[in-house]
Image (spheres, rainbow, N blue to C red):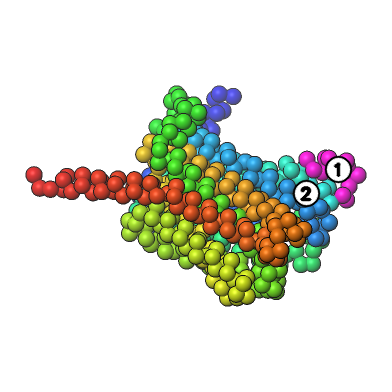
Amino acid sequence: MSSQFWVTMKSWKAVSPRFLPFADVISENLPLSRLIRLSLFQFSVGMAATLLIGTLNRVLIVEMGVSAWLVALMVALPLVFAPFRALIGFKSDHHKSVLGWRRVPYIWIGTILQFGGLSIMPFALILLSGDTHWPMWFSHVAAALAFLLVGAGMQTVQTAGLALATDIAPEKDRPRVVALMYVMLLVGMVISGIVFSFFLEPFTQIQLIQVVQGAASVTVALNVIALWKQEARQPHKTRAEDLAPPFKKIWNQFISNYQVKRFLITLGLGTAAFSMQDIILEPYGGQILHLTVSQTSFLTALMSAGSLLAFALSAKWLSQGMNPYRIASAALLVGLIAFSAVIFSEPMESPVLFRIGSFLIGFGAGLFSVSTLIIAMQMDSLGMTGLAIGAWGAVNTSASGIAISLGGLIRDVVSDLALKGVLGEVMNTPGIGYSVVYHIEIYLLFATLVAMGPLVLYRKKEVKLQATKLGFVDLPS
């Protein structure tokens, strides 16, 4: 067995390096073609998100008659894995590998989890619809397992993928890397949504099986293309004899930093502020402003357009050396204007003002996401890039999921109390539940600005000190 192993190893050594999946060297040169190819893993994540949140959400409730509360629970299950993103990032920082890879093994594990979840999902959903002789508890377990696998895969792929992008991108190129990653995520969601709608017309269960399993195959193909020759082998960083520090110790060291702790609090508050309206914005346009289905659907395009503009501008500003904390602060100010416009669109009966507010929400959220991810990417001085990005992803995803759930709950509870007359005659209006949520988001934006203030000043002092030091070094002797 041992001799056969060494024969196999020798045969691999005889293969030309250009046919192997390793990058030749750790190069600071990052051409756009390589960057676009790397960003394909974001396309696969966007495709999975569209499938879970959009296509399957509607198909299960409308075509298959599954209870809405059960569908909502299943769609929310992938968020259970979000807090583990920090651990995934840490593990990829300290991975032991004979091949010398740190990030690729975790991206591949995430890909397999996505593939497995998507492969069994259509059959689990058919069981969930009641078209089976199996007990109902078994269908619940099967569907939950499928959604959990896909969610775990998405979180793992995105965390390790962004860490790999940080590893291979020079610091000056990181803004465009982040911007392109987000653009590819949106592109994946848009294109996959169009493709899914095309292949599911007319809807049949067989067609659903083919679409979901086709998405599983495409996920593997895209991620293999994305990873090919991206990460260079670094055996000195993955030696088995090097003892990895315990996660708890490193996490405590990471979180003990004043700037890091305050940044994560700021990130959670800001993400919640922009996310709470996600599931009530379109119903608000339809119920309060009497927009048609087509007109409310256009809101998604408006918000996406705002996000794309934000990605382009933030990449430009960050490349010019602008303080990312100041960009995040500007995003919060844009959010204040956006939610004010949405609130005032009801008494003014102005769909135009509502659309402007929706566009600005997308713009502000995009600016905030890119700038905060850049801040996380810059926390690599202790070699904890994966941990920092994982912590960013954990806080971002968890805060978003909690805020979306609370947004829907608060809207329903307040509307119900208002209709019963508990809040008084003045508050008994159809839009009061929505208005309360939007006001809470404004308060959260103010809280985020308060939390971020010291970070902007801290960064400003840091930049001044660095500039002074460089100035003295550059003086002629």
Residue at 54% across, 65% down = 340
Q: Position of residue 54 (x, y in %)?
A: 69, 59
Does the rendering let one see residue 119? Answer: no
Classify residue 207 as left or right of residue 348. Answer: right
| Element class at badge 2 | helix
Does the rendering let one see residue 204? Answer: yes
Residue at 54% across, 33% down = 8
Give the spatial CA distance, label 2 vs label 1. Answer: 12 Å
Residue 449 or residue 372, whichever sits in front? 449
Label 1 amino acid? Answer: Met
Foreground tag (2 vs 1): 2
Quarter of the view holding residue 173: bottom left
- Looking at marks 2 and 1 on the same chain, the residue that comes earlier in the sequence is marked by 2
Pointer 2: what residue? 70
Residue 64 or residue 76, whichever sits in front? 76
Q: Position of residue 245 (x, y in %)?
A: 46, 27
User: What is the span of residues highlighted in magenta in the rendered image?
Assistant: 130-141
Q: Does the segment drawn in magenta span residue 131?
A: yes
Classify residue 276 as left or right of residue 14. Answer: right
Residue 208 or residue 6, whichever sits in front? 208
Q: Does the segment drawn in magenta span residue 363?
A: no
Residue 136 is marked as 1
Label 2 amino acid? Answer: Leu
Number of numbered discs overlaid on the protein picture: 2
Crowd tier of the residue under label 2, counting other residues whose Cα lies within 10 Å: few below 14, some 14–19, many 20 or above = some
Classify residue 386 as left or right of residue 195. Answer: left
Quadrant into which the N terminus falls: top right
Residue at 68% across, 69% down = 288
Quadrant into which the C terminus falls: top left
Quarter of the view holding residue 263: top left
Quarter of the view holding residue 260: top left
